[in-house]
Amino acid sequence: MSYETLETEREGAILRVWLNRPERRNAVSPLLLRELGDLFNSLETDFDTRLVVLGGRGKSFCAGADRKPDPAAREAEAATSDRGRRWIGQLGRRACRAIQDCEALTLAQVHGHAIGGGACLALSCDFRIAAEDAVFLVPEVDLAIPLSWGAVPLLIQEVGAARAREILLRCPSLDGKEAEGLNLVHKAVPADALAGEVQAWAEDLLTRPELAVHMTKTQLRGYARLSSLGDATEADGDLITVAQRSETFRERFAMPPKER
């Protein structure tokens, strides 16, 4: 399959998936989210792929929402109806769920910025390796909207309720080492060592018996969902759509971070 916003590279059992909008610091767009969902869903019967590395081209992993969306994008056509707008509002959740449900192991390679939706994409991976100078930020509450994309229960599962509450409500900017201390990433290394560390982790994971790894990932996924006692994340798109109608959101979304 060919993609407009993604680039893929095959290296034996490893598939490298690059967010490929470097001129926008890989800011998320409806097309990027749809293509991510399509790609990860397509791996269900790709038995040659045992591990997927998700990274970003250019200066950042993913800088969050695109503040200058393409008005000619095909997804814009869907926004002409209520059902179409709801479909667009669920694209982020579907992309994250596709990454979480991927039959292969997933590993995020994070450098530069992982903001908002970018942090959600990284969080959806099984493993996360970051540069020490990477910047993690979940600014949604500062923007007058809730975090959506099904990321709230995922964040709680990964870092614990107390730290998730702090990250969501205080909106701290965290570097890679701070993120490692909170279990937001598994390891932080100097930026020039990031690619090598990711490769080392990938090669190490591939030394484990394939079927045992796959079945263990299935167990972990099942228990994570059991512990959540249900899934209310389908309402996330509706919550964000309502919140984006507020005047406060429109003002803050258009405002540079330092002025908020």
Image: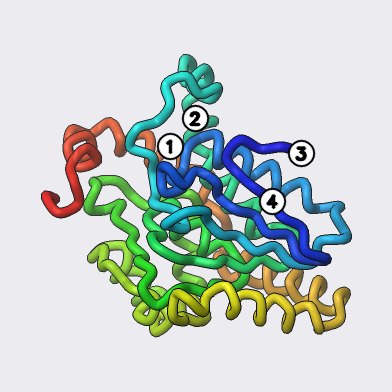
For the residues bearing labels 1 and 2, Cβ distance under 8 angstroms: yes
- Secondary structure, mark 1, is helix
Label 3 amino acid? Met
The alpha-carbon separation of the residues under discs 1 and 2 comes to 7 Å
- Secondary structure, mark 4, is strand
The alpha-carbon separation of the residues under discs 3 and 1 comes to 31 Å
Location of mark 2 (residue) = 86
Q: Earlier in the sequence, mark 2 or mark 4?
A: 4
| Residue 24: quadrant of the picture | top left
Q: Is residue 83 visible?
A: no
Label 2 amino acid? Arg
For the residues bearing labels 4 and 1, Cβ distance under 8 angstroms: no
In this rendering, which labeled residue sits more in front, label 4 or label 1? Answer: 4
The alpha-carbon separation of the residues under discs 2 and 3 comes to 26 Å
Residue 134 picture location, percent across and down = 38, 69
The alpha-carbon separation of the residues under discs 4 and 1 comes to 32 Å
Residue 20 placement, left or right of 17 = left
| Residue 182: quadrant of the picture | bottom left
Residue 248 placement, left or right of 131 = left
Location of mark 3 (residue) = 1
In this rendering, which labeled residue sits more in front, label 2 or label 4? Answer: 4
- Secondary structure, mark 2, is helix
Residue 211 placement, left or right of 240 = right
Q: Quarter of the image containing the N terminus?
A: top right
Categorize mark 1 by other alpha carbons within 10 Å: few (<14), some (14-19), many (20+).
some
